[in-house]
Amino acid sequence: MSQLPIERVIPSLIEGLRHHSQIILKASTGAGKSTHLPLMLLKENVIEGKIIMLEPRRLAARNIANYLASQLGESVGEQVGFRVRGETKVSSKTRLEIVTEGVMTRMLQADPELSGVGLLIFDEYHERSLHADTSLAFSLEVQEALRDDLKILVMSATLDQESLKSLLPMALYLESDGRLFPVDTSYVPLKANQRIVEATELAIRRTLTNELGSILVFLSGVGEIKQLEEQLKDLPSDIVIASLYGQLDPRKQQQALKPAAKGQRKVVLATNIAETSLTIEGIRIVIDSGYERKATFDVKTGITKLEQRRIAQSSAEQRKGRAGRLEPGLCIRLYSESQFLQQALLQSPEIESSDLSSLVLELSKWGVTNPLDLQWLTPPPNANTEQARSLLCQLGFIDLQGQLTALGEQSQRLGLEPRLAAIILQAQQHSIEHLHTALYLLPIIEEPAKSISSKDLSFHLSLLVDGKYPKQAYYQQRIQRLAKLLSVKEEAKLASIDIIGEVLAVGFPERLAMAKGSIGQFQLANGHGVQMDEIESIAQSDYLVVVDLLKGNQNRSYVFLAASLSKSSLMDVASHLITESEYVDWDEKSSRMVAENRRYLGKLILERKSISSPDPDKISFALLSMLKRKGLMCLDWNKGVQALHSRLQCCREWLPEISLPAMRESELLESADEWLLPFMNGIKSDKQLKTINLIDALEAYVGWDKIKQINEYFPTHYLLPTGTKAKICYELQSDPKISVRMQEVYGEAQTPLLAKGTKKLVMELLSPAQRPLQTTSDLAGFWNGSYKEVQKEMKGRYPKHIWPDDPATHQATKKTKRHFN
């Protein structure tokens, strides 16, 4: 242990803890920050009070606690203990507690002063778990407001130290090298159309042949691990295949961590759980697929989508470091070096892409309604926060002001996810049958058996109640812990399959679903469509409570777990969420007005009844809605209206000081309730819309005072010397224009000006037969220039008409020569 690189910075760190309240430690993989540093802190007795160290993963927390206790020659629970969800090993002797899964957050909530605690350590902070970010935000406020003697140490191998330094500007920054053992990197990108499992299998077999030592393989998920396990069954008996992932039985996890027996080699197939904090004995080679599976929360649908995506460069370096822990190693990356360089430098924080309902509930308990009142490395996104508030209001845990309700206070004491807490609390208030049904359902919802393909929760529950569920003992322990928490004794015979739907409905209000379309197609209360296989027993249900689903490709989501629900139960348990309103809208298919009284659950229409005399205002708004969908063509948009509209658009563009409202078609549709609605009295159909005088409507919208200015600066016609009124054509992309016979502008020496003199009036000069001869915005220049060519040609073609030598001074006329004789 004395050779660990962390030794070099421990004196500075211990000295720093005496004089600084905050320390940032960057220590590369294998430096000993998780395993050696805590022992040194205990040995030096530098901290007054207990040390709490946060680990992002349960497996790491248990293993580090076991390792540190063994180094002290003790059992876990003496000087070194741990707390994870559902398991605690601490005693009055415990000086160092390793905690995870929100335990630190709950400790802070229970005792904001952290009595008896001297140091908080945030290990592997680069993983940026939601719990770690929350605990750090709370801890910083505690340190600032209540405990200026509290110490905070943030450490990791791949810290974003610049961002952390801006969050903790007064912190001491220390950096340690990692292991000195070199790790060679080899890039072996996939061939065209080659699948990652196939490439990984080939890499494993090739490496076993060409290299010595055990291998750690990083894959994106459990499915790939199991597929590879099956494909590698034919390996010699001296090659041990071990798996390592979060849901794996703890005993099998330990088997993966132990060194291979003498004369054997080990191939560990792992998810990114093996990236940090865990020392897998005997590993010399890492094979990195370059992928991980991450859950991304969709705010619009309220659904989490599990996506396979490329890891960040920091994660790739963490994986590589696993090979250099104990000896020189080799890292084989199943992608190219250019792909590595294109990957993000750091992995994105969980807070940016998660369901934040638990966080918002924690904040409400903490007394914070605006998350920005706390110090965050990455503030919670506003959209995710608002979505979480909406759900918590529906569950009855917070009020409209974001304050914690009495029910919300009770939920916090349970230490459950908000949805599950709502289910158990409501069931407890209902009946003993409901409570026991909830007790037996919750462990299934938290971690359903993957070996059971059925999506029907009643099937899962029946197996569990009958004692036939996979890993029955594990689930039974969880049920017993929940029952003890609620001060009841669990009895399987009291759990009822018949009431599953109504027990679960309170926890998933926006996921209550109604059949829509073909068998297996449903719509959720939040409006999102979901589906399941037709062969599922609940696929033909009229109503469902959807507990677990994932968003797939092409905007479709698939139901993983659900329970059937009768309409009467739905109306009962969701009565507080059901609303009634008068619905009036134009049905384009039947070309008629639809007027109904409707009962809604979110976006689901539960019931509808026709109305014979709907509210006239709602008819108007229904027609406006139709207009916005179909466009201005629904109105009598005739040439006169088009001409006025063009003038208004040109005025708004060319003379902005007149301050006209927005006039583009899309903008007029958007503001139709302002300019069109006042003229819709008595209008009840699409045909009647065409009777509205749009010129009056638009002029009223602009205002009579501004219409006077428009008429002055943008006249509809230009009065020619002959008395003819030539219509002026206005277009945004060109100057105003008239078309006129050339003889009628004789005597006009200069081009007329419009729009306060900012625009020249373009003249399209026509022959006696109304054919274009010349278009000009410089009349004087035309008379003195190219007119001579026109005169010469026109005299021969139209000899009866006047073609003077000096048209600028000649009298304008509509007549031929004989009228001048």
Image (spheres, rainbow, N blue to C red):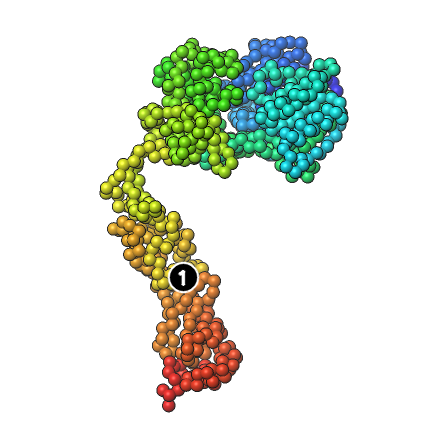
Q: Nearer the viewer, residue 432 or 499?
A: 499
- Quarter of the figure with residue 88: top right
**Residue 578: image location, x then y, percent:** 33, 31
Q: Nearer the viewer, residue 201 or 606?
A: 201
Residue hosting label 1 = 646
Q: Nearer the viewer, residue 237 or 430?
A: 237
The residue positioned 38% from the left and 52% from the top of the image is 631
**Residue 132: image location, x then y, percent:** 56, 26
Q: Is residue 801 above or below residue 268?
A: below
Q: Is residue 162 visible?
A: no
**Where's the C terminus, which quadrant?**
bottom left
Q: Amino acid at mark 1?
A: Ser
Q: Is residue 363 above or below residue 615?
A: above
Q: Residues within 10 Å of mark 1 (few under 14, many from 20)?
A: some
The residue positioned 41% from the left and 21% from the top of the image is 423
The residue positioned 74% from the left and 21% from the top of the image is 213
Q: Is residue 129 above or below residue 646?
A: above
Does 563 sit left or right of 204 as displayed?
left
Does 510 sit left or right of 322 as displayed?
left
**Where's the N terminus, which quadrant?**
top right
Does 159 sit left or right of 559 as displayed?
right
**Residue 68: image location, x then y, percent:** 65, 15
